Amino acid sequence: MRPRSTTLTQHELEIMKIVWQSGKATVRDVYEALLERRKIAYTTVMTTMKTLEDKGHLTHRAHAEDRAYVYEPTRPKKQVIGAMVQEFVNRVFDGSAEPLMVHLVKDRHLSKKGFAEITRMIRESE
């Protein structure tokens, strides 16, 4: 059996970013934040947050004042994004980040500032 993917779908990542930003959120909080960007059904948000909980990305507890659940991330954003990037590098570039960096530089996906920061980090790690 294949190990569970750590990669979030686009919709799951969008929801996780909202929860990470606020530290905790109800389904209603996430729904209202998403509504500012696009039309979405409340039940879609609720189902996706339950899926994220089933996948181990969210945990919930009952809100003290009403019946709504308050969801919190189980891992920090940096850790989840790092795992997603590592999974991508492993899958697409056979575990080597060098071809990814070459691609980003050649296709100008890095700003001069970003390139300088990466160069500085490489020099510091040597």
Image (tube, helix red, strand yellow):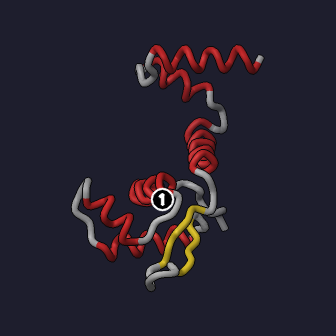
For image coordinates 44% across by 83% down, the residue present is: 66
The relative height of residue 3 versus residue 61 in the rendered view (above or below) is above
Query: Which is more toward the observer, 40 or 103?
Result: 40
On the question of residue 9 being in view, the answer is no
Seen at 48% across and 74% down, the residue is 50
Where residue 27 appears, x then y in whole percent?
40, 71
Location of residue 93 with respect to 49 vertically, above or below: above
| Whether residue 65 is situated above or below residue 92 in the rendered picture | below
Tell me the quarter of the image containing the N terminus: bottom right
Q: Position of residue 80 (x, y in %)?
A: 59, 51
In the rendered image, the residue lying farthest to the right is 126
Q: Nearer the viewer, residue 99 or 101?
A: 101
Quick check: 6 left or right of 126?
A: left
In the drawing, does residue 2 fall left or right of residue 8? right
> Number of callouts in the render?
1
- What's the amino acid at mark 1? Val
Q: Residue furthest left?
A: 39
**Residue on which the image places disc 1:** 19
Q: Visible in this render: residue 19?
A: yes
Q: Position of residue 55 (x, y in %)?
A: 57, 68
Task: Residue 109: give x, y in percent of width and height.
Answer: 42, 24
Helix, strand or loop status at disc 1: helix
Label 1: few (<14), some (14–19) or many (≥20) C-alpha neighbours in 10 Å: many
Answer with left or right where residue 111 lies relative to residue 39.
Answer: right
Q: Looking at the rendering, in which quadrant would you find the C terminus? A: top right
The residue at the point 56 percent across, 67 percent down is 58
Q: Residue at x 41, y 75 (%)?
A: 47
Instruction: Residue at the far front: name it.
Output: 65
Q: In the image shown, does 58 or 99 lie closer to the viewer?
A: 58
Q: Quadrant of residue 35?
A: bottom left
